[in-house]
Amino acid sequence: MPTRHTLPVFLIAWSLLSLTASAADWRQPLQPMFEQHCIDCHDADAKKGGLDLQALSWRPDDAENFQQWTKVFDKVRHGEMPPRKKERPAAETLKSFLGTLHDEMHRVSAERQSREGRTVLRRLNRSEYENTVHALLGVDTPLRDLLPEDATAEGFDNVGAALELSAVHLEQYLQAADKALREAVVSKAKPEVTTEKHDYEATEKAYHHFYTQFGRTEDGRLGIRFTGQISIGELPWKGPVVEGHYRVRIRAQGFIDKHGPAAKPADKNRPERRVIMNVGIKTGRTGSLEHLAFVELPHDAMREVELIARIPVGKSIYLAPYRAVPELPDERAMVTGVCIAVESVTIEGPLFEEWPSRGHKLLFGELPLVPADARKPNENLHAVSPQADADARRLVRAFLPKIFRRPVSEADAEDFVALALDELKQGRPFDEAIIAACKMALCSPQFLFLQEKPGRLDDHALAARLSYFLWSAPPDDELLALAAQKKLGDSATLRAQTERMLASPRAAAFTRNFLASWLNLRDIDFTQPDTKLYPEFEDYLRDSMMRETHAFFDEMLRHDLSVRNFIHSDFAMLNERLAEHYGIGGVKGDDIRKVTLPPDSRRGGILTQGAILKVSANGTTTSPVVRGAYVLDRILGTPPDPPPKDVPSIEPDIRGATTIREQLEKHRSQTQCAGCHAKLDPPGFALESYDVTGRWRANYRAIPDSAKDKIVGTPGSDVRYYITGPAVNPAYQLADGRAFKDMAEFQNLLLTQSDQVARCVTEKLLTYATGARIQFADRDVIEAIVQRSKQTNHGLRSLVHEIVQSQPFLQK
C-alpha cells in the first residue's frame, strides 16, 4: 500500500494512463507541476477550493470541464497557485506546464471556433430592437418597455448566449411591431403646425394663490415655489390634439423668495443663488411626472430655453423649481424658498422631419391615399392599389431587404408575399394586407437575429456587426452600399467607416450602452441613498453623475487618450453641481466641461466618479468586498471566485458600533475566506474614502441612537440627520505585499498594471462588439492587440480600431 507521500505520484500516473494514448502524450509535461506543487492540496481527501485533480478528467467538449481547466491555467499563470507561502515552482517546470496547457486549450478552442463560430445566433436586445425599428420606420414610438427584460452574460445584455427567444417574446414582438407600423402609416391628413403661448397667471388663479405654493419677485412677477411636491407647476395647456414632437420654448428665471422659510439675512460674502428648474411632462395634478431635463436659471435675468419633446395626447408641460445652486454650507435639504418666475412658455408643433413618414413610404411607396368616407376627406385614409396583387408582391419584396439588412432572394421572400396575397384573398383591405406581411417580417428570425455564418463574415453581416457595435442600430445607406459593392472587408475602408461612425452623433449609443454593461451603469437607480444618512443626494446630482462618466469616456475616445486615465487622470468632466459635491471650486453652470485637476486632487479617473461609486454600493453603506470585486472584474479583468455557500456575508454596521475593517478582520480569520480577501479587500478599502453618493469622507456617517445625538437641521425641514461615525481608514496592502495609505497611492500602484487594464478594456470591448464571451482562442489575439496598442500608450480610440480589424470581429 503506498504511503501518503508516494500516493500523489501513483494517482497522477493512474489518472494519466486512464486517458487515451493521444491525450496522455500531451498531458505528460503537466505531471511534474501537479505532482510537486498541486496534488497534496487538491486530491480526493483535501480537495481545497473544491478542486479534486484526481477527478478532473480532460473533456474539452464539455463547457464546464473546459472552464475548470481554464481556471487551473489562470490560477497558475497569475501566481495564485501554488499559494505564496508554498514552495515556488522551478522556472522550467512552470514554463512547461503553462506552455503545454495553453497550446492544447488554444487548439481545442480554435477548432471549435472554426467549426461553429465564436458567436451563437444572436438576437437583437431590447434597445437594439427599438433603435432598429425607429431607424427603419422613421418613428420614435416607445417600444423598449413593451418587451421582456434581456438577460445578461459577463454583465453584457447583447451576448447571444444569454438572449433567449420565448413565446412571450414573440407575442410582445407582435404587439411592438404593430404599434410601430400603425404610427408610421399615414391615416390622416398632415396636422397643421400651430404655435401657442402660455403663462402661469391662470394657474395662480386656479390654486387661489396659496402662499406656500407661489411667490413674487421684487418686481411683482409670479413665481412658483418649491414645495417638495409635484402638484403645482403644470402649464395651463390641455396638451396636444395629436401625439408627436413639439418645440417648447421657456423664458424663466430663478430666485429665492425673500419672504419664504429659507430667507437669509443679506450677506455680501454669500455667493449668488441660481435655481435649477425641472422640466417634465405630466397628466393632471395627480399624474406621474416624466422627467425631460434639468435647466439652470440665473437669478438676475430671464433665460430662454428650447427643447423638443414627444408629448402624448392629454399630457402637458410641467415646470418646477428643483434646488438652489450653489448649495450653502448650512443647508442640508432643498429649501422651500426656491422659486422660478416663468414669463412665458411657447409650444410649437406637431413637428415632422418628413411627411409621409419614412415608414409609410417604405410600406406603400407613392400609392395614393383615399378616405374611407368621402364626406371626411382628411380622416381614415388608406393606401389603395388598382393592381393589388402585383403591388403587394413589389412592395413586400422591396421592404424585406431594408429590414433584413441584406439582399433577399425570391425564395426568402415567398412566405411574406404569400401572407399578403392570402390576406387580399380573404377580403382584407390592401393596406392591412401589407401591414400584416410587414409585421410578420418584423417578428421573423431574419430580422430579430443577426445573420452570420461560420467563417469570415460576408460584407452585409460585417456591416451589421459594425453598426450594432458603434450605433446599436442597423447599417445606414453608406454601409449597405459598400457591402453591396463588397468593399467593406477592405482594411482601409473599414477603418475609414469606423472613423466616420465614431464621429457621428449616433455614436452616443456606443458610449451609453457599452458603459451601461461594462461599468454596470444601467443599475444606477437600483438603490437610492438613505435620506437619513445622505440628504444631499437628489435626481439632479444623479443626472450629473451619469453625464460626467459619459463625457469622460467620450473625451478619451475623441482624443485617443490612454486607458491609464481610467485609473487616474489629471482632468475631470464636471458641472457646478458635481464640483460642489466633490469640493472643487471655480466651476459654474450646468454644462459638463473639462476641468484640470490640481496634483493633490482626490478626483481623477473613473473610480472616483460619483456614478461608479454609487453603483458599487448600496443605498446605505459601502462594502470593501463589493467594491473590491467591482474593481477586479470591471477594471482589471480578474473577477474573484464566488464566495463559499456556507460563509455569511458581511453587513456594515450603520450604527457605527463596529467598523467594516473590524468585521472583515474577523471574517478573514476563517481559512476558506483569507485567500480571496487578500485580492478583494485592497481596492475596496482604498475606495472607503468615498461614500455611497461619491462624496469624499474622513468619517463614516451613522444613524443616531437617541434624540440627544440628532443634529438640528434647516427649520421646517423633515429630513432626519446623521451623526459623525468612526474614522475611515483606507490604508491597506496588495496581495503581493505593496502597501498604500490612501486612494492616491492605490491609484499609483494600479498604474503599474497598465497592460492589465488595457487587456481588460480590450476584452470588454470585444465582448460587446461581437456579442460573445471571450474564449480561450481569443487570448492570443487580445494579447497582440495590447502589445500593438502600446504604440499609442493604449489609446482608447486605437483599441476600438484594433477590435474592428481583429479576427474575432471579422469572423462569426
Image (cartoon, helix red, strand yellow):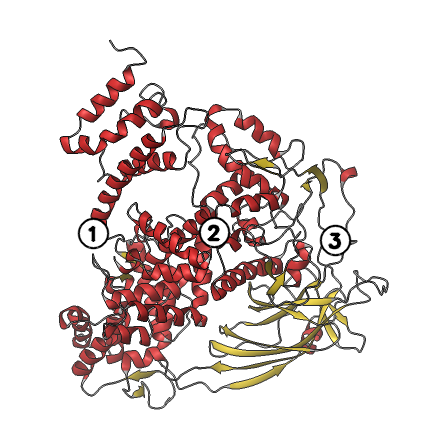
Position of residue 227 measured from the top left corner of the image (x, y, whole percent): 70, 61
Q: Which image quadrant for residue 801? A: bottom left
Distance of label 3 from label 1 (alpha carbons): 66 Å
**Can the viewer see residue 440 in this picture?**
no
Read off the residue under disc 2. 520
In the picture, the quarter occupied by the C terminus is: bottom left
- Closer mark to the observer between disc 3 and disc 1: 1
- Residue 451, numbered label: none
Q: Earlier in the sequence, mark 3 or mark 1?
A: 1
Read off the residue under disc 1. 114
Q: Earlier in the sequence, mark 3 or mark 2?
A: 2
Distance of label 2 from label 1 (alpha carbons): 32 Å
Q: Secondary structure at mark 3?
A: loop
Amino acid at the residue labelled 2: Asn
Residue under the point 69% across and 43% down: 698
- Above or below — where is 214 with respect to 724? below
Amino acid at the residue labelled 3: Ser
Circle 1 residues within 10 Å: few <14, some 14–19, many ≥20? some
Read off the residue under disc 3. 717
- Closer to the camera in the image, 491 or 700: 491
Position of residue 429 measured from the top left corner of the image (x, y, whole percent): 24, 79
- Closer to the camera in the image, 487 or 516: 487
Position of residue 337 measured from the top left corner of the image (x, y, whole percent): 76, 63
Q: Secondary structure at mark 1?
A: helix
**Can the viewer see residue 552 in this picture?**
yes
- Above or below — where is 588 with respect to 532? below
In the picture, the quarter occupied by the N terminus is: top left
